[in-house]
Amino acid sequence: MKERLKIGITCYPTLGGSGVVATELGKLLAEKGHEVHFITHSMPFRLGKFDRNIFYHEVEVNDYYVFKYPPYDLSLASKLAQVVQLEELDLLHVHYAIPHAVCALLAKQMVGDKLKVVTTLHGTDITVLAQDESLSDLIRYAINQSDAVTAVSKDLIEETRRLLNIEKHIDLAYNFVDKRVYFPREVTDLRKEFAQPDEKILIHISNFRPVKRVTDVVEIFHRVAQEIPCRLLFVGEGPELSKVLCRVKELGLLDRVTFCGKQDDVAQLLSLSDVMLLPSEKESFGLVALEAMACGVPTVASNTGGIPELIVHGESGFLADIGDVEQMAHYTKQLLTDKPLYEKIVEACLYRARFTFCNDVITRQYEEIYYRVLGLPIPDELKLKPLNC
Ligand code: GMT
């Protein structure tokens, strides 16, 4: 019986939660003995050091002068087909429908039907791109032709069905955190860099796109800071950064807000924080809130997309309507002033991150999907091994 699979993974390697999930999954699969080949335009940023069973194949895009737009999609499809044949891969697991699923299907046509394609939908590939009429038919095609499709929340499955009128079965595979990386840690010295002992710390981490509504974070902080001594950390950068900076200045909050820029080790910054703010317009899952939960930090978020599947309102965080900064500020103040409530919610966050969204559970779900599409029996080891959460 074949137990060790040869898996190709394609993702956007340098930005966003989809790249993080794809890379972390690849690393975990490699640790479990599978052979994992990343086929991407640059080295996934969480990959770094050499790992056993992990290989990296760079997609080089031809920029010949007749091309107005360098054909990344065609170069990727061609590279996928080459690597599949050279390395005798069993399947391609592609993250984000456009263009990755389409490229993988083209590669499949080039090498033959034996190759299986698993596509993971992450959010904006559906909630934004599937609404664009120039792309929606292509996305529907990619989903229908994939051998298996997964989505990161029930809400995203429903959105996919609704927006694209799709009946195909879509497997649910939530985002996960590696419990060895995301856990509450002792950061007393580092905390002193950002706040006085009597001050609380709020944190927001994102790519500062309009969908994140980062100026709402400033509005919430402004309301909280009027009553409670506190500081705000912004981690990440993106198109809304200058707007956010302007609003911080306008409200005279510059000396209470730190812009940390892009950071690799967010587990440390999360561990020194008290509350995470995530007032997004749309969020198919909200990986960053899960990372916060795993570090023992509750999130106040908007009640949208897949967030309520992660955060149970009043139990493992708080949810309010999109844009309701008053209510979000109210919940934040409640968390910062009611110690028994805060401790109860932190405990629930840690439990939920560790048992419902832990790496062992979700990696195993993906493996089961791989064996299923390949028509192979699920190894006993996978079925019987007790969960190590
Ligand atoms: O949040 C982003 O803008 C990045 C985006 C991505 O594609 O990398 O994140 C999406 O995928 C993550 C991993 O599955 C989810 O946790 C995020 O909720 C989702 N973002 C949105 O739906 C806006």
Image: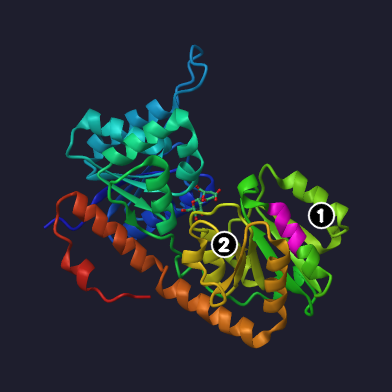
Q: CA distance from mark 1 to mark 2?
A: 25 Å
Measuring 82% from the left and 64% from the top, which residue is drawn there? 256
Measuring 67% from the left and 48% from the top, which residue is drawn there? 237
The N terminus lies in quadrant: bottom left
Q: Position of residue 345 (x, y in %)?
A: 57, 79
Numbered range of the magenta stretch: 214-220
Could you say which disc has been placed on residue 303 in the image?
Answer: 2
Q: Residues within 10 Å of mark 1 (few under 14, many from 20)?
A: many
Q: Position of residue 274 (x, y in %)?
A: 67, 73
In this view, the residue farthest toward the top is: 66
Q: Residues within 10 Å of mark 2 (few under 14, many from 20)?
A: many
Classify 186 as above or below 373. below
Amino acid under disc 1 = Val
Question: Does the magenta-highlighted stretch encompass residue 219?
Answer: yes
Classify 113 as above or below 54. above
- Of 101 and 44, nearer the camera is 101
Measuring 14% from the left and 59% from the top, which residue is drawn there? 377
Q: Position of residue 112 (x, y in %)?
A: 18, 33
- Give the residue number, with chain letter if any, for mark 1: 248
Q: Position of residue 214 (x, y in %)?
A: 69, 53
On the question of residue 43 being in view, the answer is no
Name which of mark 1 and mark 2 comes first in the sequence.
Answer: 1
Amino acid under disc 2 = Asn
The C terminus lies in quadrant: bottom left
Q: Secondary structure at mark 1?
A: helix
Cβ of mark 1 under 8 A from ligand 1 = no
